């Protein structure tokens, strides 16, 4: 039975939305006070001018945070599933991507990347840094295509964890993770960029049991 996957960027997007609303609200209040003082003869024209870039940043952050809602006007959320909720080292599983289109859409490219990511967090003085290394295990790129309203696109393909690979691991300063990255480029519309984590167990498939 296929196991649906949730995008790993969901929590980050919620945080970005809250931060963007707070940033924009504070910037608008600052700008309103400065403009009111300037119009009232307070001489704060430069303060009002100084606040404009912060308002612009807040608007951009809010647009980025709400991009899925904008994309959702034409496309339904991607439906991603795996043939199992977890996989062993050396094992194969099937990946399925289903995309429904609410309105006519011209898709210029669909890229599906299966990757391994290693992250290490360390302190340097008072600053905290995260170093990340990614290794692409498999990748597929599908050409452009136009879809009418109501159309559904489906892609299914095997994914295999290499027999000498590392399993998933998470600690306070180190992480080993597996992801399927989906990138759908849409003509004249925001792209879909999502990552879905795959859980790899600390077990290995015996060579004679690996499916060819």
Image (cartoon, rainbow, N blue to C red):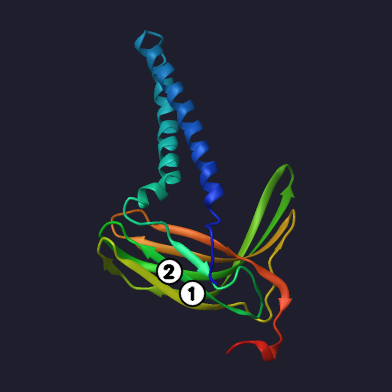
Residue 154, x across and y down, in percent: 39, 71
In percent of the image, x 49 and y 40: which residue is there?
Answer: 17
Q: Are marks 2 and 1 in contact (CB under 8 Å)?
A: yes
Q: Is residue 2 or residue 174 the one in the foreground?
A: 2
Residue 80, x across and y down, in percent: 48, 65
Q: Please determine whether, in this image, residue 200 is positioned above or below residue 149.
A: below
Q: Is residue 131 or residue 50 the one in the foreground?
A: 131
Q: Looking at the image, tell me whether mark 2 or mark 1 is earlier in sequence order.
A: 2
Q: Is residue 202 or residue 43 the one in the foreground?
A: 202
Residue 207, x across and y down, in percent: 69, 89
Residue 62, x across and y down, in percent: 43, 40
Horizontal placement of 117 versus 46: left or right?
Answer: right
Horizontal placement of 70 versus 88: left or right?
Answer: left
Q: Which residue is mark 1?
A: 139
Looking at the rendered structure, the secondary structure element under dot 1 is: strand
Looking at the rendered structure, the secondary structure element under dot 2 is: strand
Per the model, the C-alpha gap separating discs 2 and 1 is 7 Å
Q: Which residue is mark 2?
A: 111
In percent of the image, x 34 and y 12: which residue is there?
Answer: 39
Which label number is shown at residue 114? none
Q: Residues within 10 Å of mark 1 (few under 14, many from 20)?
A: few
The image quadrant of residue 166 is: bottom right
Horizontal placement of 17 versus 41: left or right?
Answer: right
Q: Please determine whether, in this image, residue 123 is positioned above or below residue 211.
A: above
The quadrant of the image that shows the N terminus is bottom right
């Amino acid at each position: 039975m296929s196991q649906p996957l949730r995008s790993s960027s969901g929590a980050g997007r919620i945080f970005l939305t809250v931060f963007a609303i707070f940033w924009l609200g504070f910037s608008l209040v600052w700008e309103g006070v400065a403009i009111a003082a300037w119009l009232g003869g307070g001489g704060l024209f430069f303060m009002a001018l100084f606040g404009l870039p912060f308002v612009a940043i807040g608007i951009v952050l809010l647009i980025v945070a709400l991009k899925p809602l904008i994309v959702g006007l034409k496309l339904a959320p991607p439906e991603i599933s795996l043939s199992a909720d977890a996989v062993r080292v050396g094992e194969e599983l099937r990946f399925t991507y289903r995309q429904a289109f609410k309105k006519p859409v011209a898709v210029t490219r669909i890229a599906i990347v299966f990757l391994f990511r290693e992250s290490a967090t360390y302190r340097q003085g008072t600053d905290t840094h995260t170093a990340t290394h990614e290794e692409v295990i498999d990748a597929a790129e599908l050409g452009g295509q136009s879809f009418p309203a109501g159309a559904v696109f489906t892609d299914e393909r095997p994914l295999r964890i290499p027999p000498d690979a590392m399993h998933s691991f998470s600690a306070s300063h180190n992480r080993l993770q597996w992801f399927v990255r989906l990138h759908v480029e849409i003509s004249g519309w925001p792209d879909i960029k999502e990552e879905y984590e795959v859980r790899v167990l600390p077990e290995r498939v015996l060579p004679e049991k690996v499916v060819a």
